[in-house]
Image (cartoon, rainbow, N blue to C red):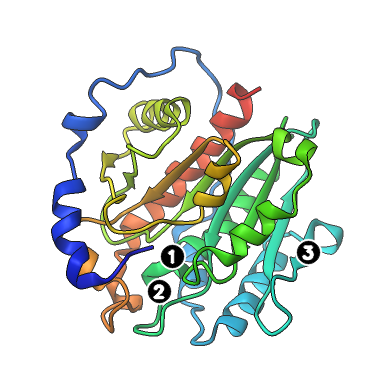
Amino acid sequence: MPATISRGVARLAAGLVCVACCLAGQSVPEQKVTIEVAPVPQEVVTKRFERLRSKDAEREAELKTIFEEAGCTDDRIVEEIVHRKDPPNIICTLPGTTNSLIIVGAHFDHAAAGAGAVDDWSGASLLPSLYQALRETPRKHTIQFIGFANEEGDQEGSGFHVKHLTKDQVSSIKAMINLECLGLSSTKVWAHAADQRLLGGLLGVAKSTHAPLQAANVEKVGTDDTQPFLEKKIPTITIHSITLETFPILHSKKDSLTAVHLDDLYESYRLAARYLSYLDQVLD
């Protein structure tokens, strides 16, 4: 996600705002829905996160294996070739009763400095567990969980995916939920860049489940895998955990397994699972 770290800290200071500043005036949907999820235990989320690999090709292979262990097998999981010499995107599909899509994305590649545990194995490793939490209940929307390749290379994996969608496929996507750099702190949302309906829904789910949520805007320091979707006018939202204090960890040797607070990572996972169940019921 980030631009150069040296310039990023000063810019992030101007972009970070507290929840009272940015979310207090946000409308919360009034409709009541039943959240139906079966989150995996915290130890499962932790063990999957700890299966971090040093090379991007190994990370893609590991992510595919974890998806299969979570029950996403056979024709539900495919690899999408971006460049022949690079790891592919990995796509796991949870079929719904309609062709309307919700996409949940995270990138599995990492920058040269550091292990990339935070940026973004923290998000990618949650994708199979989110699939597992949602799979037992019939869903209206088809939900695709996508591990994107080469986000650090100007969103090449997500850009390739969006570029090769047909007009009908683009129109079928009702939301793109991006999971980026989780577990550094309690759950944050990039409020300025979020679709307002998606933002209101996340706030409503967080409030109803007493889950911590704050706004932390990061447009001054970089972009993420929502960008190609935004260019097609697809509603997006990025869920993350970056703060002014933790931002320098990214793209540095400090980006390791020990940088992630496992309790915070699990809380973000549970909120994301409930949020996806909510969106499945309220989106068209």
Q: Position of residue 172 (x, y in %)?
A: 73, 34
Residue type at the position of mark 3: Val
Q: Earlier in the sequence, mark 3 or mark 2?
A: 3
The foreground one among 83 and 236 is 83
Residue at image mark 3: 78
Q: Position of residue 276 (x, y in %)?
A: 55, 38
Q: Are marks 3 and 2 in contact (CB under 8 Å)?
A: no
Left or right: residue 224 versus residue 145 is left
Spatial CA distance of label 3 from label 2 is: 24 Å
Residue type at the position of mark 2: Ala
Give neighbour class at mark 3: few <14, some 14-19, many 20+ (Cα, 10 Å). Answer: some
Quadrant housing the C terminus = top right
Q: Earlier in the sequence, mark 1 or mark 3?
A: 3
Left or right: residue 73 versus residue 27 is right
Q: Are marks 1 and 2 in contact (CB under 8 Å)?
A: yes
Residue visible at 77% across and 61% down in the picture: 77
Spatial CA distance of label 1 from label 2 is: 6 Å
Q: Earlier in the sequence, mark 1 or mark 2?
A: 2
Give the numbered dot on residue 122: 1
The foreground one among 33 and 276 is 276
Give neighbour class at mark 1: few <14, some 14-19, many 20+ (Cα, 10 Å). Answer: many
**Residue 281 at least partly seen:** yes
- 127 in relation to 111, above or below: above
Tag 2's secondary structure? helix
Quadrant housing the N terminus = bottom left
The foreground one among 103 and 159 is 159
Residue visible at 76% across and 39% down in the picture: 167
Residue visible at 60% across and 41% down in the picture: 232
Give the numbered dot on residue 117: 2
Residue type at the position of mark 1: Ser
Tag 3's secondary structure? strand
